[in-house]
Image (cartoon, rainbow, N blue to C red):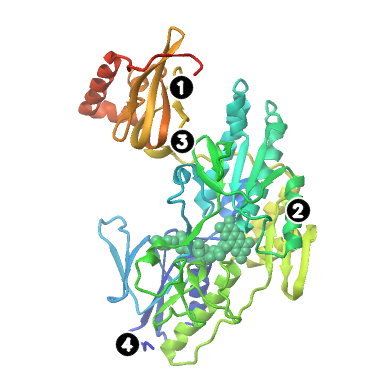
Amino acid sequence: MTEPKAGRRSRIVVLGGGFAGIYTAMELEKAMDARDDFEVVLINKENYFVFQPMLPEVISGTIGMLDVVSPIRRLLPRTDLHVREVESVDLERKIVVCSPGFRAQPHVVPFDHLVLALGSVTDFRGMRGLPEHAFPFKNLGDALDLRNHVIRAMDEASIERHDERLRKQLLTFVVAGGGFSGVEVVAELNDFVRAVARNYPGLDPQEIRIVLLHAQDRILPEVEESLGLFAQKILIKRGVEIRFDTVLEAASGEEAILKGGERIPTKTLVSTVPAFPHPLLQGLPLPKAGNGKLLSTRHGNVEGQTSVWALGDGAILPMKDGKPSPPTAQHAIRQGAVVAHNIVATLRGQPLRTFDFLGLGKMGSLGRHSAVAELPGGIRISGFLAWFFWRSVYLMKLPGWGRKVRVASSWALDFLLPPELVQLKLGGSGGVTQEHFEPGQEVFRQGDLGDRVYVILSGAAEVWRKADGRVKPLARLGPGDWFGEMALLNQTTRGATVRCVEAMDALSLPKRDFTVLAANLPELRESFERVMASRRTAPAREDDPVPVGR
Ligand SMILES: Cc1cc2nc3c(=O)[nH]c(=O)nc-3n(C[C@H](O)[C@H](O)[C@H](O)COP(=O)(O)OP(=O)(O)OC[C@H]3O[C@@H](n4cnc5c(N)ncnc54)[C@H](O)[C@@H]3O)c2cc1C
C-alpha cells in the first residue's frame, strides 16, 4: 500500500463533513504525532456538521436551529477545512476538483489517500411533480424551509375563512415514508401543528389532517414488530392518519397523488424517500452495488483500491456477519474510526483492522415524550422510558459541551414553555421556480390577483374566459408559450382562467422579478406587449362556448 513519499507529508483528503467524514478526520487527528507524516484536508459544502438525528426537532422548535449543528473548525482544529462543493474526482491524477470561490477558477486539491464520505441524497427525479412540490428532509435548510412553510400554511388557513377548500388544503400535511426519518418528521409535525393551533382562534383544530403514507403494512420496518405496532398506536392516538400499503406517485402544488389515482388535497408534502448514493459517485470507475453504493471491504478501502476509502450512507461496508452496514449514524461513526486507523496503518506499515461493529440497537422518537428502542440482547423498550433513553444517548453523542448544554436547556424549557412560533424568513425566496400541474388543475382563475408569469416547458394548458354567463375557450398553449403577463403589465386581476389539460411543467417567475425585468429590458416588455395585444384581439376559438360552471 502507499508509503509516504520521502520528505513530504502524505495528504489525506476527506470528502464530506457528515458523521462518516467528521469521525474519520477526528480519529486521524488523534493519530497525529511527532512523526508528522500526514496532513488531513476535509472538504464540505457547509462549514458545519449537522447532527441529523435531532433535525426533526427543528420543525417543532423544541431545539433551536443552531443547536443541531456544530462548526467543523471547532470539532477538527488540526484539519484543513475547505468549504467548497466537490465537483469531480480524478482518480488517475489523484485530484479533487471543487467549485470556484471568489476567484472564478476551480479549486484543485491533490491527494495521496481519498476518503469518500458524501452520504446519500433524496432524489425525486423521475417522480412527477415531486422535485417541484415535495419537501425533502435531509439537511438544516430542509428543516428550516419546512418549518417556515408549515407556519405560513397555518397563518394563511387562519385568514382563509371563506374558502373552505383552500383552508382544508392548507391544514392537511402529508409525509411520505414510514421509516425512522418519516416517522420522526410526522411525529414532530403533528405535535407542533396541534400545539400551536390554539394560537389561531379562527382555526378549527378538527380541520387539521396529518397523514403518513407508507408503502408497507406496518411502519418502522427497521424494528421488531411489537415496537412498530406501538409506534403506530401512539401516532394514531395523537391524530396522525396512517395510510398503509400506499405509494406516493406524483404531486402538484395542490395535491399528493397516490398510486391508484386517489388524490389528497394539500399544500404541504414532505418525502423522506427515496434516498440514493451521491450522484458524484456514479461517474467514478469504482466497484458499486446495484443501488449505486460503493463496495468497500471490511477494512474500509474500496474493493480493489489501496488508497481510496468509502464509508457512511454512500458505501456498502460489510459488518462482521457479512451483511451490509445499515445507513445509520452509529455505523458511520465506527466506520470512521476503522478507516482512519487503516489509513494511518497503511502509511506506517502497521497491520490493518476490520470493521467488527454489529450495532448498538435502534431508536426512534415518536414526538412528545415517547419513543421506541431496540437494544442489544433483545431488550425492547417503548414510551417515556425509551424517550428518556433516546434523549440521553443523543445528548451524550452531540459533539461539544456548548451544544450539549444548549440542547439540554432547550429540552428542559420545552416542558414549561409553549412551542416557538416565529417564522424565520431569511431573505426572499424569489426567482424562477419550476412548477408541475396535473390535467384539470387550474393554474389561476379569472378574477385572481396577478402574481406570476408562466413559461410552459412541457404539456399543455387551455385559456378560458367567462363573459355574459358563458365560458369561452380562448387558446390552447404548449411548450415555449408563456401566459399570465397581462395582469402583471396592466396591474389588473386575471382576465381569464388557465387550466392544465396535459400534465404540464412550467417555469414560474414572481411578479417582483418580472416587473424588474420588464422595466429594465424594454425589448422584453415590448415583445410581451405585442403578444398581449394580439391575444386581446384574437377571436375566441371555434369550439362552442359552454355555460359557466363547466
Ligand atoms: C431526519 C434524519 C434522522 C435520522 N435519525 C437517525 C437516528 O436517529 N439514528 C441514526 O443512527 N441515524 C439517523 N439518521 C441517519 C444518519 O444521519 C446517517 O446515516 C448519517 O448522517 C450518514 O452519515 P454520512 O457521513 O454518510 O452522510 P451525511 O451525514 O449525509 O454527510 C454527507 C456530507 O457530505 C456533504 N456533501 C455532499 N455533497 C457534497 C459535495 N458535492 N461537496 C462537498 N460536500 C458535500 C454534505 O454537506 C454532508 O455534510 C437520520 C437521518 C435523517 C436524514
**Residue at the spot x=46%, y=8% of the render?**
469
Which amino acid is tagged 4? Lys
**Image: 353 above or below 469:** below
Given contact means CB atoms under 8 Å apart, are the residues at marks 2 and 1 in contact?
A: no
**Circle 2 residue:** 369
**Circle 3 residue:** 438
**Residue at the spot x=76%, y=51% of the render?**
233
- In the drawing, what numbered circle is on residue 445? 1
Q: How far across and how far down the image is residue 422, in percent? A: 60, 39
Secondary structure beneath disc 3? loop
**Residue at the spot x=57%, y=73% of the render?**
325
CA distance for labels 3 and 2: 40 Å
Foreground: disc 3 or disc 2 = 3
**Circle 4 residue:** 5
Dot 1 surroundings within 10 Å: few (below 14), some, or many (20 or more)? some
CA distance for labels 4 and 2: 55 Å
Q: Quadrant of residue 218?
A: bottom right
